[in-house]
Image (cartoon, rainbow, N blue to C red):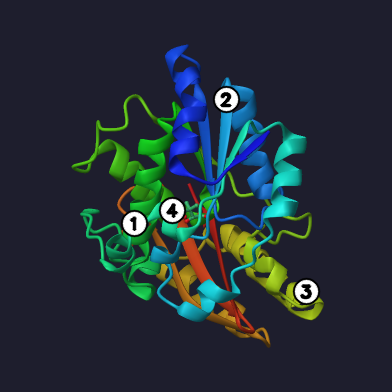
Amino acid sequence: MQILTTKQALQQALAESHQCQKTVGLVPTMGALHEGHATLVRRAVAENDICVVSVFVNPTQFNNREDLLKYPRNLERDAELLSRIGADFVFAPTPEEMYSAEEMNTTFQFDFAGLDQVMEGKMRPGHFNGVVQVVSRLFYLVQPARAYFGEKDFQQLAIIHHMVERSSLAGTFGKLQIIDCPIVREPSGLALSSRNERLSAAERETALAISRTLFASLEWAKSASVQEVQQRVIDAINAVDGLEVEYYEIVDQSTLLPADSFSHAIGCVTVYCGPVRLIDNIKYE
Ligand code: PAF
C-alpha cells in the first residue's frame, strides 16, 4: 500500500490503472477509522481492481472551528488498518495541497434542490457545500468506477446522489456508481462514529439510549402517527440525563421533506451527549 500526499502523485499512480481499464473504488473518509469505515473499504477492495481511500479532515465542511480542531486524527493507525484490509492507495493531502487560499475562503454554492435546507443543512449552514466541494474534487482526481458512503450520514448520501445524478455536475464523473452502505453498529446498538472516540466511558453508556429509542420507535410506529412517534422519540431521549436532542425528523427518504406516513420514511436524529454531537437514523419502510 502506498500513502500519497499530493494530487499529482495520486493521478500519476492511477494513470496506468485507468489506461488498462482497471476499475477503481474510492472510499472518502476523514480518518479516525473504525469498523464502519473498514466495512466500506473491504467492499471496495472486493468489488474493484484498485482501492483508494482518502483520509482528509476537510476544513471547508466545518462551520465550527473548535469542532475542526478537536476532530480526531491518527494517520499512522489508519494506514495500518487500511494496509491490513488490502487498500492499494491512501490519499492524505494537507488542506493547502487540496485547496488554494482562495478556495479555502470562498463559500462554494451548489444547488441541492432543497435537500440541504433541512436537518443537518439547517443546523450547519454551508456544511454540505464543503462536503460536495471536497467529494467532487476527489471524484475528478480519482475517476472512480464506484464510491462508497455510509448510510449513517443519510442526508450527505442523498446530496451526493443528487450531485452525481441530477445536478449541473451530473454526467461529469463518467459512469460513477454511488454505493450506499448500511450503518455499522456496536453489539450494544451504538452507531459507529469517529466522534465516539471523544465519549467518556459513562457517556458511551448514556449514548446507548439513542439507538435503543430509535429501535423502540419501530414498534411505536405500528400504532401511532408520524407526529406522535416523532415527539415520543424526542421526549424519550431528552428524558435521559446527559442527552439533548437537537432534532429528530421523520422524512421521506428521497425528498427529505417531512413524511406524512411511514412508507419510505426515515427518522434522522442528532443528539448532544455531553459535548459530543452524535447522529443516527432508522428506516421505517
Ligand atoms: O462522511 C465523511 O467522513 C465526510 O463528510 C466525507 C464524505 C469524507 C467528505 O469530507
Mark 3 and mark 1: Cα distance apart in space: 30 Å
Q: Which residue sits furthest bottom?
A: 241
Q: Quadrant of residue 207?
A: bottom right
Residue that carries the numbered disc 1 in the rendered image: 256
Mark 3 and mark 4: Cα distance apart in space: 40 Å
Q: Is residue 179 visible?
A: no
Mark 2 and mark 4: Cα distance apart in space: 23 Å
Q: Is residue 207 visible?
A: yes
Q: Is residue 36 left or right of residue 106?
A: right
Task: Residue 28 in the image: state x and y as whole percent.
Answer: 51, 45
Query: Which residue is drawn at the image coordinates 67% and 33% (left, top)?
Result: 42
* Closest to the observer, 128 or 69: 69
Sequence order check: which comes first, mark 3 or mark 1? 3
Which dot marks residue 205? Answer: 3
Query: Which residue is drawn at the image coordinates 66% and 86% (left, top)?
Result: 242
* Closest to the observer, 206 or 259: 206
Residue that carries the numbered disc 2 in the rendered image: 50
